[in-house]
Image (cartoon, coloured by chain):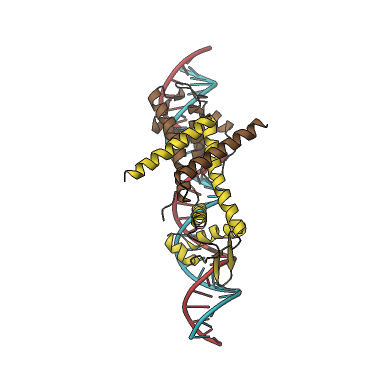
Chain colours: A brown, B yellow, C red, D cyan
Amino acid sequence: MEFDDKVPIYLQIKQYLYQAIITGRLKSGAQLPAVRQLAAELTVNVNTVQRALSELIQEGVLVTRRGRGNFVTDDIKVLIELKNRVIATELGTLYRQLADLNLSAEEMKDAFAQYVDEQEAHHDHQ
Amino acid sequence: MEFDDKVPIYLQIKQYLYQAIITGRLKSGAQLPAVRQLAAELTVNVNTVQRALSELIQEGVLVTRRGRGNFVTDDIKVLIELKNRVIATELGTLYRQLADLNLSAEEMKDAFAQYVDEQEAHHDHQ
DNA sequence: ACTAGTGTATTAGTTATCTATTACACTGTA
DNA sequence: TACAGTGTAATAGATAACTAATACACTAGT
């Protein structure tokens, strides 16, 4: 996997796992690949994977069972909360950045809507 | 100044300067504070400031005159292009993140619009 | 010429992240 | 009981970012 060398890899792995869980590629209760396999897939060290996993465990998103493996929590509430939290964080980041550039609420919404429409148009033409 | 310790400080300083220039707090042709003063204001080392500045100089956003100081370019076209580039980058980041979470174009626009409206409502109540 | 105020460069030391390697602990099955 | 497959921990070394300190180079004003 390719990483942005300006942000710690373990944080990018967290994002990658959030994404897999939120989109349902890793479903509630599902077992994750073994840490050594994950490390191989991501072309990264086991310790780095472990660091990301341990934070997800801390958050209650993952559950670890010694000798068995790591699993996505079966607590649906936690997963719903996770999705809301992740999306809100991303929306908030853009909002703050645009606010810092003195864009009004209307300008922000228009700019983003226009950007999205442009991207969709490009996709259609592919 | 407070920094996020998960992203290099010199990049955050770049963003800070982009913001100052785009919002007109630093106008076209204006002289920047001396590097030592900037370092003091940002509570950061001179070398770190210098690293950020040298990238802005490389981009043509700033112009340096030895012994005189650093100045915002008086090439308006460069500044307009800068604003467009910075905003497009930020919009693109959110777009990609939400696309990775399988949100549709409509869902993205609605989610952001709703977020912005909520923020504005909170501001009114302050 | 001197001096104060600029940017620039170099060196050395600290810290966080990441890697590589090895070892250990627990679980389930043959 | 062995063993293969899990997670977990610890150590040592590499690299990038940051800091601190010092020195150098150029400009403008006295």
Q: Is residue B5 visible?
A: no
Where residue A116 appears, x then y in whole percent? 56, 36
Above/below status of A72 relative to B10: above
Tally of numbered discs: 0
Pick out the residue farthest to the left: B126
A93 is higher (above) or lower (below) than D21? above
Outermost residue toward the right in this view: A126
**Side (left or right) of A56 relative to C12:** left
Percent coordinates x, y for residue B76 in the rendering: 59, 59
Residue A89 screen position, x and y as percent: 44, 38
* Residue closest to the eye, B27 or B53: B27
Residue at the spot 49% in from the left edge and 67% down from the top edge: B34
Q: Give me the residue at 61% from left, 57% from top.
A: B78
Q: Is residue C19 above or below residue B66?
A: above
Residue A78 visible in the picture? yes
Query: Residue A76, located in which quarter of the rendered image?
Result: top left
Q: Residue at x 52, y 44 (%)?
A: A7
- Indicate the quadrant containing the N terminus of chain B: top left, top right, bottom left or bottom right: bottom left
Q: Position of residue B84 (x, y in %)?
A: 57, 49
